[in-house]
Each structure stands twice: as C-alpha cells, then as structure tokens.
Amino acid sequence: MLVFAVIFISLACVTYTIGVWAEKFQNNLKLWHVLVFWLGLAFDTTGTSFMEKIAGGGFQISFHAVTGLSAVLLMLFHAIWATTVIAKNNEKWKRNFHKFSIVVWVIWLIPMASGMIQHL
C-alpha cells in the first residue's frame, strides 16, 4: 500500500506543480489548468487515503496532519475558485489567479516535505 501512496502523492505533486506554474507562465487561467488542479486534488486525496490506512486510520493531531488537512482543503477551495473564475470568464480574475495559486502550492508543499522528513 505504501507504493501506491507514494505514487499518488508524487502524481499530485507533478500535476499540481505543472498546473500552477503553467498558469503563472501563461499569465492567464485556462480550462486545462483547472482540470489539472482537480486531477492533482484527486491524486492527493487518493494518496492521503492510502497513507491514512497505513497509519491505522483516524486523524491524529500533529504538524503533518494539520498542515496536510489544511493543504487538501485549500486545494479543494482553489479548484472550486478556479472553476468559478473560468465559468464567469472574468479576464481580470483569470490574469490574477496565479497569485492565489502559488500561495496554495507553497502551502501544499509544507505537508509533503514534512511527511518525507518525518519518515526518513
């Protein structure tokens, strides 16, 4: 099960990073970015579910758990907001969305790094 957890978390990192930085470099939110955000969220949620099963289930208060839950909730909000921006087709919002994306991405990296460090 650990192999699947690592694969899905790694896929989340790759897809989410591609989506966030492609949006930043293109300086405009596009539909394919939104789809990649949702895909990254799906990979992250799947990988997190595997890791929760490995850990014995249940939420335990720790730095990694709190930042991880916060990151998943932020990713969900990010994907919903991106979907809203695309649906409303507001050009100003689309051009400025990357500022929010980068903040969410950096916050998402915290539990990823803490999980890796915690299990060295």
Image (tube, rainbow, N blue to C red):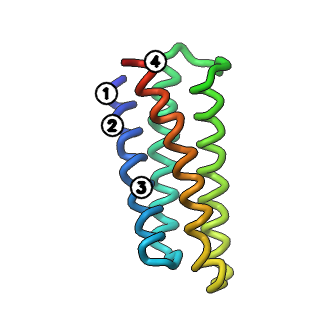
Q: Which residue is mark 4?
A: 54
N-terminal-most mark, 2 or 3: 2
Which amino acid type is marked by label 2?
Ile
Side (left or right) of 50 relative to 4 = right
Q: Are marks 2 and 1 in contact (CB under 8 Å)?
A: yes
Image spot of residue 71 (x, y percent): 60, 42
Which amino acid type is marked by label 3?
Thr
Q: Which residue is mark 1?
A: 3
Q: Nearer the viewer, mark 2 or mark 3?
A: 3
Is the residue 8 above or below the residue 4 in the image? below
Q: Which residue is mark 2?
A: 7
Q: Secondary structure at mark 2?
A: helix
N-terminal-most mark, 4 or 1: 1
Q: Looking at the rendering, which quadrant does residue 59 occupy?
A: top right
Image spot of residue 76 (x, y percent): 62, 52
Image spot of residue 36 (x, y percent): 45, 61
* Whole-number angstrom distance, CA of label 3 to CA of label 1: 21 Å
N-terminal-most mark, 3 or 4: 3
Q: Secondary structure at mark 4?
A: helix
Q: Which residue is mark 3?
A: 17
* Whole-number angstrom distance, CA of label 2 to CA of label 1: 6 Å
Q: Residue at x 60, y 43 (%)?
A: 72
N-terminal-most mark, 3 or 1: 1
